Amino acid sequence: MIAPSILSADFARLGAEADAVDNADWLHVDVMDAHFVPNLTLGLPVVASLRKATALPLDCHLMIDDPDRWAPGYAEIGAANVTFHVEAADDAVQTARAIRAAGALAGLSVKPGTPLEPYLDILREFDTLLVMTVEPGFGGQSFMPEVLPKVRLARKQVASGHLRLFVEVDGGITLDTIEAAAEAGADVFVAGSAVYGAEDPARAVDALRASARAAMDW
Ligand code: DX5
Ligand code: ZN
């Protein structure tokens, strides 16, 4: 699945920017609070409006402190997937259960420096694992191939039947890097600048999907 990130879109025209990628699978929405990450973007009211403006499933990526308090609200307003950071959560399992109870998929995200092994057990409570392939906070950064062992480990757990998860990568995904991520085992690909920086965002989505598919030989 390809999930264009509206972080690289025109925030004054979010409905039209969603329409521009109506061939995408999910629309990725980066929520930043200027505490967990230095940047500030948007929150619940904007996501609630966007929900009504597009038929695309919303993939909310919460880069915020205290996700235990805020994450279920995104599920309640109709997000398809709500991902929060393990580094910020006090009770990740309880929060995942609250997200699922409100009708969304629950996602857990790890920053590049956060190992995956300590969280393999709690991943049973989740539908999505988001492996950050840049430091969270800003679009347009360079892909970090050194985090791909985490993608491989997650794919192995899924292939062996230990977990059932989407394995999502986020940050620096372009036509030059998507194959490495797909080969390692990712099946959901977030792309901000590679989609909205392209002359034709919808064509960029198709090109990324074709590249990823060709490399998913696992
Ligand atoms: C970064 C965000 C990403 C960002 C990716 O913190 O989580 O979703 O939009 O942008 P690109 O694809 O430009 O790296
Ligand atoms: Zn993101």
Image (spheres, rainbow, N blue to C red):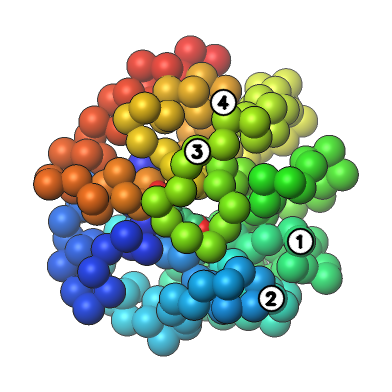
Q: Between marks 2 and 1, how big is the CA–CA gap?
A: 9 Å
- Neighbours of disc 2 within 10 Å: few (<14), some (14-19), many (20+): many
Q: Report the front residue among 11 and 202.
A: 11
- Observer-side mark, 4 or 2, equals 2
Q: Report the front residue among 58 and 179.
A: 179
**Residue 185, numbered circle:** 4
Residue type pointed to by label 4: Gly
Residue at the top extreme?
217
- Observer-side mark, 1 or 4, equals 1
Question: Does dot 2 land on a helix, a strand or a loop?
Answer: loop
Q: Looking at mark 3, is its residue's CB closer than 8 Å to ligand 1?
A: yes
Is residue 202 depicted above or below 81 in this figure? above
Which tag, 2 or 1, sits closer to the chain's start? 2
Which tag, 1 or 4, sits closer to the chain's start? 1
Which tag, 3 or 2, sits closer to the chain's start? 2
Is residue 213 depicted above or below 90 in this figure? above
Q: Give the residue at mark 2.
A: 65
**Residue 143, numbered circle:** 3
Residue type pointed to by label 1: Glu
Q: Give the residue at mark 1.
A: 87
Which tag, 4 or 3, sits closer to the chain's start? 3
